[in-house]
Image: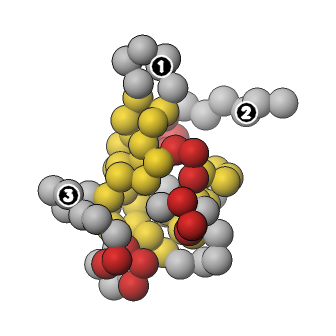
Amino acid sequence: MVKFIIAKQLVGKKVITNDGFDVGRLFDVEISEVTGKIVNLVVEPNMDSSIANKLKIESGQIRVPYNSVLAVNDYCVVDRKNI
């Protein structure tokens, strides 16, 4: 069963890797104009995080591919290997 979540409920959620590292907070999402599906999560990085410092930061933000999202509940959990 697919669970639908309203986008504004996602904004501000903490983004962590599947092994517990803090990446940052969800700022926005990028959506495909053709399919209407989420393509990337736009994350404000936690600059104290060793993982966030290793990722490519553009304009103060990190783009995390949506296919790396494993779960969304209290946190957005992403697969560390795919980011």
**What residue type is disc 1 on?**
Gly
Please state the horizontal and vertical placement of residue 70, each as a whole percent of the image: 66, 54
Q: How is the image coloured?
A: secondary structure
Of 36 and 5, nearer the camera is: 36
Sequence-first tag of 3 and 2: 2
**What residue type is disc 2 on?**
Lys
Of 9 and 35, nearer the camera is: 35
At 31% across and 78% down in the image, what residue appears? 53
Q: Is residue 63 visible?
A: yes
- Where on the picture, by quarter, is residue 77? bottom right
Counting labels gives: 3
Q: Secondary structure at mark 2?
A: loop
**What residue type is disc 3 on?**
Glu
Circle 3 or circle 2, nearest the eye: 3
Please state the horizontal and vertical placement of residue 20, each as a whole percent of the image: 61, 78
At 61% across and 34% down in the image, what residue appears? 5
Please state the horizontal and vertical placement of residue 59, each as a whole percent of the image: 15, 56
Inter-mark Cα distance, 3 to 2? 31 Å
User: Residue under circle 1?
Assistant: 36
Of 45 and 55, nearer the camera is: 55
Q: Residue furthest front?
A: 81
Inter-mark Cα distance, 1 to 2? 16 Å
Q: Which mark is residue 16?
A: none
Q: Residue furthest right?
A: 1
Circle 1 or circle 2, nearest the eye: 1
User: Residue under circle 2?
Assistant: 3
User: Residue under circle 3?
Assistant: 58
Q: Which quadrant of the figure contains the N terminus?
A: top right
